[in-house]
Amino acid sequence: MRAIEEFAANPRPGEVCNLGGGRENSISVIEVIGRIEQMTGRKMNWRYLEKARKGDHICYISNLGKFKSRYPNWKITRSLDAILEEIVTLQRERVAQTHCHIKRICL
C-alpha cells in the first residue's frame, strides 16, 4: 500500500518498475513450508516433484533499486517472518471459528 501511495503522490505514467520483497525478503516455497512448520509445531503434508512446471523461474528476486530511486520515501515495512506469523495467526483464528460454528458452542 505504501508503494501505491507514493506512486499516487508522484505518478510516472508508462514507467515500469519491479516491486516485491527484494533480496532481504526472498524465500523459496520449501523454506516457507519449513518456517510454517516451525511456527505451528506441525508437519505439512507435501511432496516435491523434480520436474519444473513450464514457465517457472528457478529463482526470482525483485530488484527494487529503480523504484526506491524514484520513490525514496518508500521502504519495506513488514518482514517476511511478520507476514508469515500473521498468516498463521489468521488461519488459527479461522479454524477456531469454524470449529466453534460446527459444534455450535460459540459464546
Image (cartoon, rainbow, N blue to C red):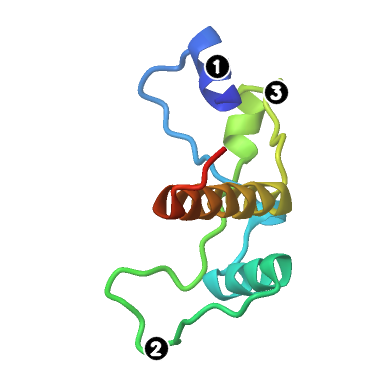
Q: Is residue 27 among the parts visible in the rendering?
A: yes
Q: Which mark, by number, is residue 5?
A: 1
Which label number is shown at residue 72? 3
Residue 11, placed above or below residue 91: above
User: Residue at the spot x=39%, y=88% of the render?
Assistant: 49
Query: Disc 2 to disc 1, how far (Cα)?
Result: 40 Å
Q: Alpha-carbon neighbours of circle 3 within 10 Å: few (<14), some, or many (≥20)?
A: few
31 on left or right of 16: right
* In the image: residue 97, left or right of residue 33: left
| Residue name at image x 50 percent, y 41 percent | 18
Name the amino acid, label 1: Glu
Q: Nearer the viewer, residue 77 or 63?
A: 77
Query: Which numbered disc, 3 or 1, marks the residue that appears first in the sequence?
Result: 1
Q: Nearer the viewer, residue 53 or 103?
A: 103
Q: Looking at this view, name the residue that lies furthest to the left.
A: 54
> Of residues 95 and 99, which is closer to you in this image?
99
Amino acid on which disc 3 is placed:
Pro
In the image, taking residue 19 as reference, residue 41 lies left or right, namely: right
**Label 3 SS:** loop
Above or below residue 23? Residue 6 is: above
Q: CA distance from mark 3 to mark 2?
A: 41 Å
Q: Residue at x 70, y 31 (%)?
A: 75
Q: Amino acid at mark 2?
A: Leu
Q: Which residue is mark 2?
A: 49
Q: Earlier in the sequence, mark 3 or mark 2?
A: 2
Q: x and y percent of residue 27 in the render?
A: 62, 64
Residue 10 appears in the picture as rendered: no
